[in-house]
Image: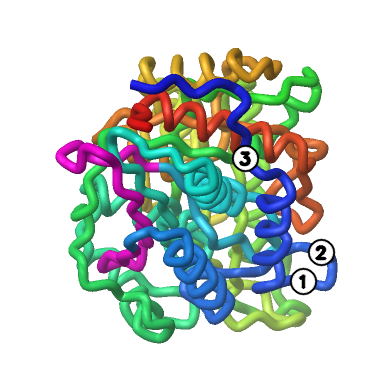
Amino acid sequence: MTQIGSNLQIDPERLWDTIHETAKFGATPKGGVRRLTLGPEDKQVRDWFRARCEAAGLEVHVDALGSMFGLRKGRDMSRAPIGLGSHLDTQPTGGKFDGVLGTLAALEVVRTLNDAGIETEAPICICNWTNEEGSRFAPAMMASAAYVGDFTTEDILSRRDAAGVSVGEALDSIGYRGDRPVGTQKFSGFVELHIEQGPILEAENKTIGVVDSGQGVLWYDGRITGFESHAGTTPMPLRRDALATLAEIVLAMEAIANRHGPKAVGTVGEAVIANPSRNVIPGEIAFTMDCRSAEAAIMDALDRDLRAAIAAIAARRKVEVTLDLVWRKPPTHFDPRLVDAVESAAKMLGLSHRRITSGAGHDACNLNTVMPAAMVFVPCKDGVSHNELEDASKADCAAGANVLMHTVLALAGVAS
Ligand code: HGY
Ligand code: MN
Ligand code: MN
């Protein structure tokens, strides 16, 4: 087998250009990207991605949930491919790099291997996973969760957004309900490049994060039922105010996360008042909650303490509160062999690096439950993500893509 040294490098300008070219699909005035999954902007970037994959000689196929796979043949097609990629959908106030870097770096790896005339032993397969963000349709990392069997394809196709549109209808509206059953594309391993979305690498002046673990996630749907009544005539002690109840719940969640910190976080990111009116006391509120920890025991404690606090608040305020756990993703421990391969690639390339836990969820976290997986992080400016200000440097993006490429080459082997 041929050895490839650090002189094989991706083309930083070409990668950077693809990141900024795709940022126009859903570009926002503040310089971010709003490209909700399975919407018109997602179709634009998917069409763009498919065309570039085909131009790079990849065999492209789409599965029943719209995930896209571009297969590059290897010398030994009896071996399952090494997967690499991420996602192209964004948050409503998303940035140019979350998911995009990992997906376009995978394309750049293919382009670089093509330019260098390198054939790998095992095939490689680049991926764009549908709805990693989970903003329009829950859960997050939806398609990779179905791929690993956490949800059936039928269940996911029936999920609806706030406007009542189902995943199936949205897939059909952009022409990306593929003909291949979910799970058809097999892999012998998966490596994902992503921005850290946190402050550690930048603070420590490290170029590469060798991701060995990831936080577990708890997603809740909550509903508060109080009593609508006149804002002017209802005495304070007689009110059953759903919004005041939610305010207490948010502060209780914050206190519970701090109490279990630093390895615990909690967020209420959505709240909708039914029939809001300035002079009506809110009677009905739907809200969502996202709690996380790298330790399963802390996740259980968060759940227990949240439910106890909410029950006490509801009783005192004489309102009803329901809290449904709609998604529980246990903490991730990535495959040691692949994590070591990432670390070896960073060392071989002479890049500063450190082991790190991912605070965010990623498709690789799901895939790791059925195959060996690992991740490569690069810094993002001020650790900011899920914000239109999200930014990263060309040099760091290129460094991450080079670590991704050399990790994949080490795993797939080089035939010539
Ligand atoms: O929520 C997450 O961690 C990911 O960004 N979807
Ligand atoms: Mn992401
Ligand atoms: Mn994200």
Q: Quadrant of the C terminus?
A: top left
For the image shown, how many numbered marks are present on the structure? 3
* Of callouts 3 and 1, the N-terminal one: 3
Q: Position of residue 81 (x, y in %)?
A: 28, 41
Q: Is residue 70 visible?
A: yes
Which label is found at residue 10? Answer: 3
Tell me how far mark 1 sits from mark 2, CA to CA.
5 Å
The residue at the far left in this view is 78
Rendered view: 410 above or below 248: above
Q: Decide whether residue 61 is among the magenta residues.
A: yes
Question: Which quadrant: the N terminus?
Answer: top left
Residue 256 is tagged as none
Which residue carries the number 1 mark?
Answer: 28
Which residue was labeled with disc 2?
31
Q: Is residue 182 above or below residue 263?
A: below
User: Is the residue marked by circle 3 packed among few (<14), some (14-19), or many (20+) residues within 10 Å?
Assistant: many
Q: Nearer the viewer, residue 252 or 97?
A: 97
Tell me the CA gap for discs 3 and 2.
26 Å
Percent x, y of residue 162: 49, 76
Give the magenta range: 60-83
Q: Between tags 3 and 2, which lies in front?
A: 3
* Amino acid at circle 3: Ile
Residue shown at the point (67%, 42%) measured from the top left: 251
Circles 1 and 2: CB atoms closer than 8 Å = yes
Task: Tell me the CA gap for discs 3 and 1.
Answer: 29 Å
Q: Residue at x 22, y 63 (%)?
A: 153
Q: Is the Cβ of the residue at disc 3 closer than 8 Å to that at disc 2?
A: no
The kind of residue tagged 2 is Gly
